[in-house]
Amino acid sequence: MEPLELSPPTAERVRLAERVVVFSGAGVSRESGLDTFRGAGGLWERMRPEELATPQAFRADPAKVWRWYAWRYGQAAAAAPNPAHDAIARLETLFPSVLVVTQNVDGLHQRAGSRNLLELHGTITRAVCERCGRSREMAGAVAESSERPPVCACGGRFRPAVVWFGEALPEAALVRAYEEATFCDLFISVGTSGTVYPAAGLIELAHQAGACLIEVNPEPTPFSRLMDLRLAAPAGEAFPALVEAMAIERSRDREEPIIG
Ligand code: OAD
C-alpha cells in the first residue's frame, strides 16, 4: 500500500490521543490463513452456526462440535500472526494506553505481542469443564481426544473456552470494554462485519462518546458512514501503513520546540 497521509483533523486527533481501543474481528486473521465467518468463503456459508456454536448443539452432538473446534484449534495453532497483528502490537509503543478488544478466539494478538487484550468471545486455546469449570490447555485436550470431548476428573465434559451464541459474554471484560470505548480518544475497528452484538455496540458507543473512528476493512460495514477515516484494504497491508502514519504524527508531537 502507498504511504498513507492522514487528513489534518485526523492527524491532530492522532497527535493528541492518549487512549486507543482496537476492536478486531475475524478479518484481521484472514491473511494468517484463517477463515472469516460471513461473506464469500466464510465459515457460516458452509456450516450452520446453530449446529456448531450453541450450547444446544453441544448437548445434541458433543462429538461433532468438539471435532469442529479441534479442527479450528489446529488451524489457529498452525497459523502465525500477520503484519496486521504485528502493527496492532506496535501501537503500544506509540500511545500511553492501548487496549485490544477482540472477538477472535485464535490467540494471534497475544502471539504478536499485544499485552493489553480482552477476548470478548473467549479463546480456543483453552478447554473448560462444563460441570466444575476446571480449565486446561486445548493442545493437551485435543491430544487426549480429537474425536469427542475429553472427560474431566469430576465426570463432566470439556468444551472449548469460547462464547457460544445464546451465552453471556464474560461480564468483567464487557464492562471494561464499554468503559474504554467511552473514554478512548481513538477507536479503530478492524476486520469485523459489526453484526454480532453486544460486541458491535462498542462502535456505536465510541461514536456517541466522540472518539475519532477509524475502520480497516475491504468491505463496507453498517458503521462505515460514521468513520472519520476508512481504509478499504486488507488489514495486513492497511494496518502497517496506518501505524506508520501514526508514528510520524506522534514523533512530531515529541519534537522539542526550537528556542532561540
Ligand atoms: P465476520 O466474518 O462477520 O466479518 C469479517 C469481516 O472481515 C468482514 O467485514 C470482511 O469484509 C472483513 N475482512 C475480510 N478479509 C479481510 C482482511 N484481509 N482484512 C480486513 N478485513 C477483512 O467476522 P466477525 O465480525 O469477527 O462469534 O464476526 C463476529 C462474530 O460472529 C465472531 O466472533 C463469531 C461469529 O459468528 C461467535 O462465534 C460467537
Image (spheres, rainbow, N blue to C red):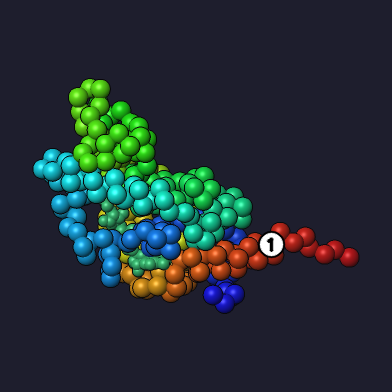
Q: Which residue is mark 1?
A: 251
Viewer-side residue, 132 vs 137: 137
Q: Is residue 107 left or right of residue 65?
A: right
Q: Is residue 74 left or right of residue 16?
A: left
Against 59, is 206 above or below?
below
Question: Residue 202 appears at what percent x and percent y?
Answer: 36, 56
Q: Residue at x 26, y 60 (%)?
A: 43
Question: Residue 95 appears at what percent x and percent y?
Answer: 59, 54
Going by the picture, which residue comes out furthest to the right? Answer: 260
Mark 1 crowd level (few <14, some 14–19, many ≥20, 10 Å Cα): few
Q: Is residue 31 visible?
A: yes
Numbered marks: total: 1
Question: Residue 124 appears at what percent x and percent y?
Answer: 34, 44
Against 190, is 69 above or below?
above
Against 96, is 214 above or below?
below
Q: Residue at x 26, y 41 (%)?
A: 146
Q: Is residue 169 visible?
A: no
- The reply to whether the residue tagged 1 has its Cβ within 8 angstroms of ligand 1 is no
Q: Is residue 86 left or right of residue 24?
A: right
Question: Residue 83 appears at what percent x and percent y?
Answer: 52, 61
Give ligand 1's quarter of the image.
Answer: bottom left
Viewer-side residue, 24 vs 99: 24
Going by the picture, which residue comes out furthest to the top? Answer: 154
Q: Residue at x 61, y 52 (%)?
A: 93
User: In what quadrant of the picture does the C terminus appear?
Assistant: bottom right
Q: Secondary structure at mark 1?
A: helix
The amino acid type found where label 1 is placed reads Ser
User: In what quadrant of the picture does the N terminus appear?
Assistant: bottom right
